[in-house]
Amino acid sequence: MSIKIDHLTHIYNEGTPFQKVALEDINMSIEKGEFVGIIGHTGSGKSTLIQMFNGLLKPTKGEVYVNQQNIHGEKINKKEMRQRVGLVFQYPEYQLFEMTVKDDVAFGPKNMGLTKEEIDKQVKFGLDAVGLDESYYEKSPFELSGGQKRRVAIAGVLAMNPEILILDEPTAGLDPKGRNELFEQLKKMHQELGLTIVLISHSMEDVAKYVEKLFVLYKGRIAYTGSPRE
Ligand code: ATP
Ligand code: MG
């Protein structure tokens, strides 16, 4: 799945005293199968930008294309778009429900009209991918650590078989070991499934080792696009 952002500007609370230009004239493209990083200081617009990728936010100006299709066009099925463009939020604990880990991860697949067997298979796929075994299935997500909650949230998005996986600060709250494990798991999914991955981070260190292409956001503008080495 490819994403193209064309001259996108986003202004929160436009025309009020609280007006804030969060993104300004952003142009970028992400090709199918790429492993991409977006880094930038706090407030640089990272979380705002990725909510454009699946149509959660509509830009003030500019266009967003997913597989060459304008996602604010008439023919777009929004529900399907949210399934194909998988977004793990910066604070994924808000994406979890008070049920078991297994039911939580099954929530998305259940909405896709799959059979019970298919749902179970997707749940296992998602939880395996983030390294949570069956001993977690009947737990409540609220009994888990911050890092484990994050894994459940990622599993829930993966269980919907997205074509692109976008993770907003996925390593926040993980120790170095957990961080490495998660990155290795993502790398494996990228290599074995050809999954397109977009990783958002504060830290260069985190992403430089893994991504093939890097975008640096600075005060709502793209300050750099290219290889992380440069
Ligand atoms: P962080 O690294 O802290 O997560 P970020 O790069 O994700 O930051 P955004 O959350 O995209 O940054 O915010 C960009 C700018 O837009 C900030 O100045 C922020 O205050 C502002 N902003 C974000 N969300 C809203 C909102 N819902 N209403 C008004 N302003 C907002
Ligand atoms: Mg953010």
Image (cartoon, rainbow, N blue to C red):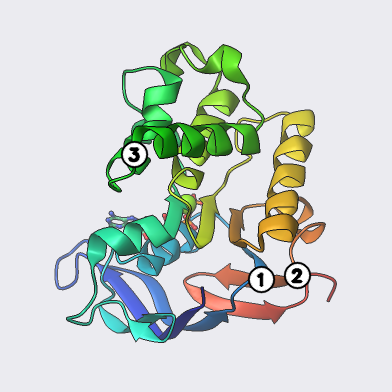
Q: Is residue 101 left or right of residue 230?
A: left
Q: Is residue 133 above or below residue 171?
A: above
Report which residue position mark 1 lands on. Answer: 34
Three-letter code for the amino acid on which mark 2 is drawn: Glu
> Residue 79's x, y, as percent?
25, 58
Three-letter code for the amino acid on which mark 1 is drawn: Glu
Secondary-structure class at tag 1:
loop
> Residue 5's x, y, as percent?
44, 82
Tell us which disc is closer to us: 1 or 3: 3
Q: Nearer the viewer, residue 12 or 101?
A: 101
Tell us which disc is closer to us: 2 or 3: 3
Q: Quadrant of residue 49?
A: bottom left
Three-letter code for the amino acid on which mark 3 is drawn: Thr
Q: Residue at x 44, y 53 (%)?
A: 87
Query: Residue 115: which numbered mark, if any?
Result: 3
Which one is earlier in the sequence, the residue at label 2 or at label 3? 3
Which one is earlier in the sequence, the residue at label 1 or at label 3? 1
